[in-house]
Amino acid sequence: MSDHGSQPNDSTPDKQGAARSLDAHVERYAQRTAGMTASEIRALFAVASRPEVVSLAGGMPNLAALPLDSIAGEVAGLISADGQSALQYGSAHGVPELREQICDIMAMEGINAHPDDVMVTVGSQMALDMVTRIFCDPGDVVLAEGPSYVGALGSFAAYQADVVHVAMDDEGLQPEALRQAISDVSAQGKRVKFLYTIPNFHNPGGVTLAVDRRAEVLEICAQHGILVLEDNPYGLLGFDGQTYPALRSLDPDNVVYLGSFSKTFASGLRVGWVLAPHAVREKLVLAAESATLCPPTLNQMIVSRYLTSHDWQGQIKVFREQYRERRDAMLGALEQHMPEGCSWTRPDGGFYVWLTAPDGVDTKAMLPRAVTQRVAYASGTGFYADRLGSRQMRLSFCYPTPERIREGVRRLANTLTDEMELVRTFGSVSQRTVQGPQAPSPDTA
Amino acid sequence: MSDHGSQPNDSTPDKQGAARSLDAHVERYAQRTAGMTASEIRALFAVASRPEVVSLAGGMPNLAALPLDSIAGEVAGLISADGQSALQYGSAHGVPELREQICDIMAMEGINAHPDDVMVTVGSQMALDMVTRIFCDPGDVVLAEGPSYVGALGSFAAYQADVVHVAMDDEGLQPEALRQAISDVSAQGKRVKFLYTIPNFHNPGGVTLAVDRRAEVLEICAQHGILVLEDNPYGLLGFDGQTYPALRSLDPDNVVYLGSFSKTFASGLRVGWVLAPHAVREKLVLAAESATLCPPTLNQMIVSRYLTSHDWQGQIKVFREQYRERRDAMLGALEQHMPEGCSWTRPDGGFYVWLTAPDGVDTKAMLPRAVTQRVAYASGTGFYADRLGSRQMRLSFCYPTPERIREGVRRLANTLTDEMELVRTFGSVSQRTVQGPQAPSPDTA
């Protein structure tokens, strides 16, 4: 994630000897391909699937409460009656009825939008990719909270944008740090293209941007001619049913907004969306045509039908209550088991707790030992473009049951206690271990 | 399509006056965005939906013969029994069982592949986008048949690659023209990254690469260190059930192969794939993670189930017979109605006929007049990156019924006859009309 800049492809013309010469195509790749490295999250998918390991690593929503039989019946009816449309190409813009329903959903967070300005995407990951595609030249700067969503960092790297992180505290992005970052980038003669932010129930930070900071953040960006990219997959998953005013609702002309059905309905359908000022939306549709022609028609119709036929808000309430119970299990277990010196965030919604270990602990180096203790997490450096986060980790409470969460945190606390004992005795991990090219990833441990 | 090079964004800092200043974000776009223009195909989607117009323009497969009720039942069973997986995130690599089945399908065209080397994509359009992403820097050259698939040209433009066309004849890509193009590009000091080719039932050319040319084309590319990107969505739609040896089967190490279920099953599911040498496939998975995280799990499982539970080869035979009947209707009507001086290809499979009008006819300028006569086609320039194709058009026989095809060709023949009469009397269209920035697109006509 750190080497996503515009440095040349470091392929070697000498095909003898070097391990990478096993790839006969090594000299053909584009420069951007040099920045594509396996994310730590990715390696963890393999771990998460082992039943004996409690995975606090992944971000998979808990779908156990979905009414599958009823959804199955709806989908069957849809294919029987409208299969000629559902199985056929559609437009890159998206199914009109779904775009109208999306506007109704966004209205719950204060957004007043026209369906024409919505484009449906293959998950909001594709929306991230398309926004970056139309705005970022190599070397352009994207501001993002530190830490930030690993998938967003991947998209920015794919377009060779440089990420500059902006610090958060318990009230989210710090306006003063934002001003400073803009000033620093400007002093380097570089151009900021947009601020990428997850204001609600941050991934991985677990914090929410305070309401009274929202107008200030928008004003700073407007003042410096910086677009705001608001990513809001968790906004309806506040544990007390609370919602916050979307940044888009406060500044419609300077905010591009991303939404998703992955956390409120079904991630495997890959249905997300982007709401953008009209001219930007037109560019996005052109970009999307060359990326996928169109999002899957069937999936859009399934979501649309689900929103019409099911009590989807009642279903979200069920999800919220499950996630609240799991959050409570995690916070309770952290309180009970974690050794002195660790601190963590206390989310009011979403999927994640962000934990900071004491100085000297290297969470990436520790991960194989944690997996040996049958617990996995996402180490912090994956959430930074600049290799910060070495003593942080993201703990997800979305997928495992409360019992498993408690057991996982207990195992993690033991691992951390052992690690801290080692640090006290022998110095920090990086002083102890021989520095290889990469710590072993959990699926090779 | 022509301005996809690496020229700077031609936005004007002066926001007064110019029409494009309506876009407040005009100065923020990436350079690549300047090359994103609405394709002629896209504008035609709007036309195709008007019932009074016979559209010979789109490439929508005919799904009328699909057993919808039976598919509906299978999908319902899938969601009821495996919904927890089908509606959940998967890997960017794709569902393992489907990748195995894809290998069985490719074996029908002589390909011997391992499922690990297959990546499932959101239609083969996404595969095109990912391959271009990992290989092409701005200014790199892609060789492609002239004409070529408009969606591929869009992907190449999105990565600011320069397309150099290679001429075809009735036997497909001409090896001699390929040698010449490589030599020309090399003389300009530019680098060819790959040859993009549709060997079977070409879109839009309607021709097939002769079997005895295949080894020669591969040898030329291997000799010059040029990768081959083989796009084969129509390979199983030969009207006599004939198949041709895939280029991939003849040179596994230097060919990246693209396949799709859009024409053999259901386009709206958006399930395609790429088969690549192992190291390239690894890069593709990393690129795909930042593009969409993963393809929709449900759609992959639907295709996998369909291949297991249905007589999918029997279904393809039904499709082939329908398309053959439509091809016959089109060729018969062209023979009967077209004015002297027009010529066209005679496809043995696939969806398309490529028609060449006499000198002086401009098919793009003529399109609004054709739509007034209630027939639409795809004008030729959209299939070239260099504005060739002005007297060509693509005629699709995939979607309309044989009766509608005959009526459409009759209307088109009348339009062409009138146009040729005008050309004879007043000179060519471009001499007659005032040159505006763009001919009116059919949905504004």
Image: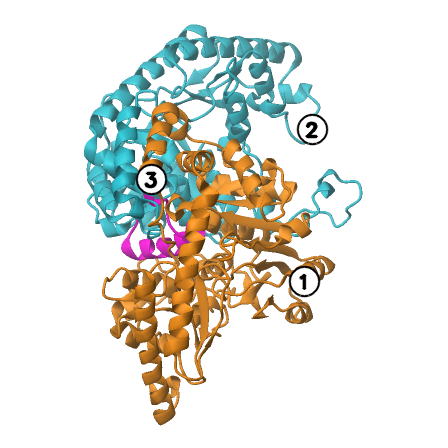
Chain colours: A orange, B cyan
**What SS does tag 1 mark?**
helix
Give, as a three-letter code, the residue at label 2: Gly
The residue that label 1 is drawn on is A212
The residue that label 3 is drawn on is B299
Q: Is residue A193 above or below residue A92?
A: below
In the rendered structure, find residue A359 and report the number of the disc placed on it.
none
Residue furthest top in the image: B336
- Measured from the top left, where is residue A77 in percent x and y? 35, 28
Please indicate whether residue A84 sits to the left or right of residue A47 in the image.
Answer: right
Foreground mark, 1 or 3, reads: 1
Q: Is residue B101 above or below residue A199?
A: above
Tag 1 and tag 3, C-beta contact below 8 Å: no
**What SS does tag 2 mark?**
loop
- Label 3 packing within 10 angstroms: few (<14), some (14-19), many (20+): many
Q: Residue at x 65, y 52 (%)?
A: B28
- Measured from the top left, where is residue A123 in percent x and y? 45, 47
